[in-house]
Image (spheres, grey):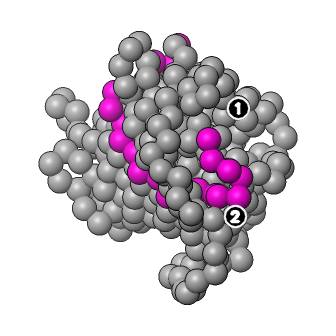
Amino acid sequence: MNAALRSLLDLLDLERIERDIFRGFSRPAVVPRVFGGQVAAQALVAAGRTVPAERPAHSLHAYFLRPGDPGAPIVYEVDRIRDGRSFTTRRVVAVQHGQPIFHLSASFQVYEDGMEHQEAMPQAPDPESLPTAEELLPAHADRFPEPGTVERLLEARAAVDLRYAQDPPFLTAGRPREPRSQVWFRTRGKLDDDPLLHVCLATYVSDMTLLDSVLLAHGRGGWAVGDVVGASLDHAMWFHRPFRADEWLLYDQRSPSASGGRGLGTAHMYTQDGRLAVTVIQEGVVRVPRSR
């Protein structure tokens, strides 16, 4: 386990202030606000710590309300909405400077047998055959107009080995293509067996690249290149089957629509042996700067 992953795990190890109130801190982000995947993962940690371990998370639905301040702590207030025989529901509000910045509802379920089917895993190259971020980003530093962007991107992804299966948006700017993007990811080190930890780390990563497919459809290079501005609006995830975030997961992402200054991304996460583990849907603000 590298230092960046240890630091990320420390961020997810929230401080318990009261029975249902937790406090967390932030790590540096590429943009001057709290990374959305971080606040979503921390909120799920807060919810999960009020639920028995034998009830793993099976879904979350969240809204990003205000930009988070990375220099200030975040307080997570958990509301115990329901404790049923099979399902447990929690609502979490993340607060900074006296205002809510994020809202999450999460549901947990006692494991039970049931009907089984899944969408087949799509074709994708072997993750070990793909370049790492440390190989890919510095080789294309000229694509990023702002000095230090490559270093900030590498720092943001230091805890997670994330590899693009096809050219990312910053390499295809000006050339629209099918609105589909695939990445493989896993943490840079082995994790404990706690299922909540693996679910929370997948939640963290899920916000990194989901809207790339929106950019690809329009030949835009993205936020780091400077030809698009945007932010996450809402986020939903369904956890279908057990998985480990320290083993390769294929994140297959598509965009069915963009309109009204918003773009929609839908995705599946598959284990390397082909099991559908997670479904993700996100809408975000996607705007072209006026000067362009």
Towards the viewer: 276 or 126: 276
| Whether residue 255 is visible | yes
Q: x, y (%) of residue 15?
A: 67, 24
- At 63% across and 53% down in the image, what residue appears? 199
Q: Main secondary structure of the magenta part?
A: loop
Towards the viewer: 109 or 255: 109
Q: Answer left or right for 105 relative to 246.
A: left
Label 1: which residue? 13
- For disc 2, the neighbor class at 10 Å (few under 14, some 14 to 19, many from 20) is many
- At 71% across and 39% down in the image, what residue appears? 159
Task: Tell me the magenta residue range.
Answer: 50-71
Counting residues from the start of the chain, the first of labels 1 and 2 encountered is 1
Towards the viewer: 130 or 16: 16
Question: Element at badge 1?
Answer: loop
Q: Quadrant of the N terminus?
A: top right
Give the image quarter of residue 179: bottom left
Q: Is residue 58 above or below residue 156?
A: below
Label 2: which residue? 243
Q: Mark 1 or 2, which is nearer the eye?
A: 1
- At 35% across and 68% down in the image, what residue appears? 178
